[in-house]
Amino acid sequence: MERKLFRYRPFNTEKINCYSDIHHKVINIEKWKLEAFEGIVQPSSPLYFNDPYDCEFCFQSDALESIPDRETYLHILEKSFSLKPEEKNRILYSENIERAMQIILQAHGGNLSASWEDILQNGLRECMNTIKDAVRVVCLSEVYDSTLMWSHYAQNHTGFCIEYDFAESDMFYEYLYPVTYTKDRYTVSKTDMLNENGEWIYKSTCSKSDVWSYEKEWRIVTANFNKVMPHKLKYPDGKYVLDLKENIKAFYLGAKISEDYEKEMTQFGKENSIGIYQMTLSPNTYELNAKKIL
């Protein structure tokens, strides 16, 4: 089984130095060529997504009870005040962690019941921001003809769209997740936190408001790039890139693409047996059509 997915891109002309598998040396290359011609994709940090809810972790109240690492409690408390050695020992070795927290908070002027939960919530949120920043996401779509996405992500139809095919045998296939669109946020439970496979990270990362459902999005999501990096990849920031060159099957050119970019992409397509499609405006509807030109 194969999964065909698409990625809308602008012509980002910023240049960077990187190793080229085509030229077999480090070259100075424009970012759009790095992705389209070299196949190198730089995943995004969720910290910079345009949707403020995107990849935000939301916790059920019982999730706080599931923090097994006493060092985490110490780290959180010490952000608020200094702890004495005996207070640290109380946190590390007390059988009743809630009671231990309350005693220490009382000694430092805290309000017993509500205060320790507030501190934990804030501390946990900070820890989750660290996890969130470690996650990297490649955003893809099931469709290549979305007028809105051509407008938002492909420079007002002047950019391009890359078609990728992912086979089940592909090393990235297991990291592909469909985005779930819903009115309610995914809330992390105690059961989620105790599950060592970290599935809750992916569920949170791939849950979005239903207002975005038109994007029909899929994501490559991982927090450990060492597991998915091809060993052959020679790139100074390797842990932040994916080599998808072998997955590229076609380019779709924006309806308003410049003649120079069209020629350059068409020439590359001819030389590398990659399909080229030109997006055109329908004469009778508000739809976009793809015309095969190569």
Image (tube, helix red, strand yellow):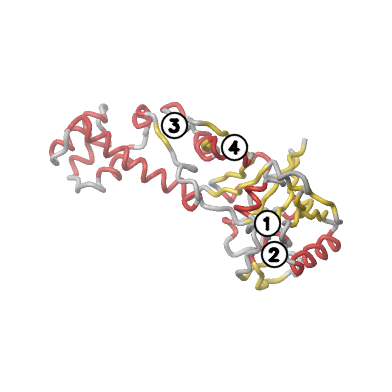
- Name which residue type carries label 1: His
Q: Which numbered circle lies on residue 157?
A: 1
Residue hosting label 3: 188
Residue 124: image location, x then y, percent: 35, 40
Which callout, 2 or 1, points to the residue nearer the camera? 1
Element under disc 2? helix
Per the model, the C-alpha gap separating discs 4 and 1 is: 20 Å
Q: Secondary structure at mark 3?
A: strand
Q: Residue at x 62, y 36 (%)?
A: 178
**Rendered view: 208 above or below 51:** above
Kindly report the distance in space between the C-alpha atoms of the residues bearing marks 4 and 3.
Answer: 22 Å
Q: Which residue is mark 2?
A: 33
Disc 2 or 1, which lies upstream in sequence?
A: 2
CB-based contact (under 8 Å), mark 4 and mark 3? no
> Residue 236: x and y, percent?
59, 65
Q: CA distance from mark 1 to mark 3?
A: 38 Å
The first of marks 4 and 2 along the sequence is 2
Q: Secondary structure at mark 1?
A: loop
**Where does residue 52 sit, x and y in percent of width and height?**
45, 46
**Amino acid type of the residue tagged 4 in the rendering:** Ser
